[in-house]
Image (cartoon, grey):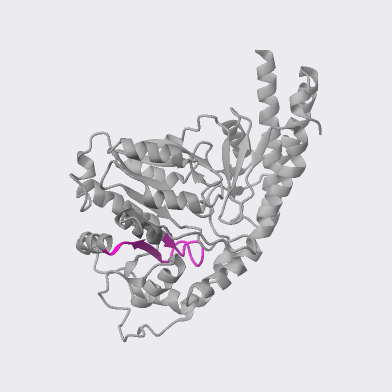
């Protein structure tokens, strides 16, 4: 393997032929591999099967969890999530299996009714906007796109969104109603927001009185190393500046127990809690409290959650290492044709290939039986201005499958880069 960037046209042509031959060998295998979504694998979900053994549905307070009532969630469940979030139980709302649904419902409340600080419902703000740190989570962006918000990209850094840009935008434009954030092990880069970034979020001045921070702690306990990273709690920090009503923090057990049958939660101010419950109470009497109680009995507290996640880590670390090892062995020797993140937690690795190549890489992978998240998905409107980013999700396949998929991916990256370099030389 030699540096592609130093090769002449003849050398690149020879390399292209060799890569095409290698690629055809993968195609002949009839592979069906998937590294598209951040799904737990069967071995991870098997770890939580004891959840289903519970048959006593009376809570510590004597409540029958099978019946109606307690919209905010069982007290025990509120205490469990308060422990995970680092807030007070009275600041926690416990929902059903999907935190994304809770986010959607809150955007919908803003759209239809507005919030207590709003001068009008968001639907009446003609040029309503939402900030989207990029690369970010496609399903977040899809919610605000669905409600007609203009999505404004803000560059991500290893310390979080570029706060100089965020602060300037929100201070000047009252039509900007919020921002999406994944502050710990961000999707997809795996970055954790710095203490300074969190402090700036807590105290920043906003032109919109009803500006909201949608703070998705999806990976708050999803550590991939022995280091347990703890960051300041945004809700608590915001209280120091009187800004707690702008914060909605979310989490769920989707990647802790069962993605399709877990428990989600919101942490917010007491004012926000009252208003949210007033709106939610028309929609639902209570979420699945039997499932909430099952999760409390199984996980117990934050310490129990971390012990359970340590079992996940043992399954996941070899898969993440396999991807990074393949990249190092197969891409690094070819020169500066790609770089990637080295996350300490979360579910993804960001792979940045030579600009103009990501869609081609994804297409080559697909034609050889490997499904990746669509190129550009981590950007608003699925438009990556550089066409360079790919989100790699090594969690669902087996280790053998991850190794095969990573080798194929590297061949596709190298082939796409060689094609691009040859096309550039032809120009």
Whether residue 401 is visible to the viewer of this picture, yes or no, is no
Q: Is residue 179 above or below residue 359?
A: below
Q: Position of residue 94 (x, y in %)?
A: 35, 67
Q: Position of residue 303 (x, y in %)?
A: 53, 74
Task: Please report the residue visible at 71 percent of the width from the left and 43 percent of the height from the top.
Answer: 327
**Residue 54 part of the magenta-drawn span:** no
Task: Please report the residue visible at 33 percent of the width from the left and 51 percent of the height from the top.
Answer: 104
Majority secondary structure of magenta residues: loop
Q: From the viewer's perspective, tell me whether residue 96 is left or right of residue 117.
A: right
Image: magenta residue range = 251-270
Foreground of the two, 144 or 119: 119
Q: Is residue 372 above or below residue 235?
A: above
Whether residue 381 is visible to the viewer of this picture, yes or no, is yes
Foreground of the two, 347 or 127: 127
Task: Please report the residue visible at 36 percent of the width from the left and 56 percent of the height from the top.
Answer: 238
Q: From the viewer's perspective, tell me whether residue 232 is left or right of residue 66.
A: right
Foreground of the two, 324 or 11: 324
């Amino acid at each position: 393997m030699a540096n592609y960037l130093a090769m002449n046209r003849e050398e690149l042509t020879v390399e292209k032929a060799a890569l095409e031959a290698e690629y055809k060998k993968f195609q002949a295998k009839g592979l069906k591999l998937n590294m598209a979504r951040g799904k737990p694998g069967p071995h991870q979900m098997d770890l939580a099967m004891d959840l289903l053994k519970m048959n006593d549905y009376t809570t510590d307070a004597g409540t029958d969890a099978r019946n109606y009532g307690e919209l905010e969630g069982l007290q025990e469940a509120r205490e469990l999530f308060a422990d995970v979030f680092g807030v007070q139980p009275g600041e926690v709302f416990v929902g059903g299996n999907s935190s994304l649904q809770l986010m959607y419902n809150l955007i919908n409340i803003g759209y239809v009714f507005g919030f207590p600080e709003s001068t009008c419902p968001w639907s009446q703000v003609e040029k309503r906007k939402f900030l989207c740190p990029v690369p970010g989570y496609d399903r977040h962006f899809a919610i605000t796109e669905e409600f007609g918000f203009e999505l404004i990209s803000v560059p991500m850094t290893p310390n979080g969104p570029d706060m100089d840009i965020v602060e300037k935008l929100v201070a000047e434009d009252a039509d900007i109603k919020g921002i999406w954030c994944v502050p710990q092990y961000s999707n997809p880069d795996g970055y954790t927001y710095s203490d300074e970034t969190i402090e700036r979020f807590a105290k920043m001045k906003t032109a919109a009185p009803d500006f909201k921070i949608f703070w998705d702690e999806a990976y708050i306990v999803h550590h991939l190393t022995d280091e347990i990273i703890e960051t300041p709690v945004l809700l608590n920090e915001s209280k120091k500046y009187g800004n707690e009503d702008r914060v909605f923090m979310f989490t769920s057990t989707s990647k802790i127990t069962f993605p399709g049958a877990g428990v989600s939660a919101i942490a917010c101010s007491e004012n926000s809690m009252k208003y949210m419950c007033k709106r939610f109470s028309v929609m639902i009497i209570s979420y699945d409290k039997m499932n909430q109680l099952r999760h409390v009995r199984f996980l117990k507290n934050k310490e129990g959650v971390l012990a359970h996640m340590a079992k996940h880590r043992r399954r996941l670390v070899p898969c993440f290492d396999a991807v990074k090892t393949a990249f190092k062995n197969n891409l690094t020797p070819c020169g500066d044709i790609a770089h990637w993140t080295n996350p300490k937690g979360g579910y993804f690795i960001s792979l940045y290939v030579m600009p103009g190549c990501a869609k081609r890489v994804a297409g080559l992978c697909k034609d050889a039986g490997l499904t990746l998240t669509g190129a550009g998905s981590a950007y608003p409107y699925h438009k990556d201005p550089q066409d360079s980013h790919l989100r790699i999700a090594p969690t669902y396949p087996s280790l053998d499958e991850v190794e095969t998929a990573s080798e194929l991916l590297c061949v596709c990256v190298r082939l796409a880069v060689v094609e691009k370099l040859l096309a550039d030389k032809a120009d």
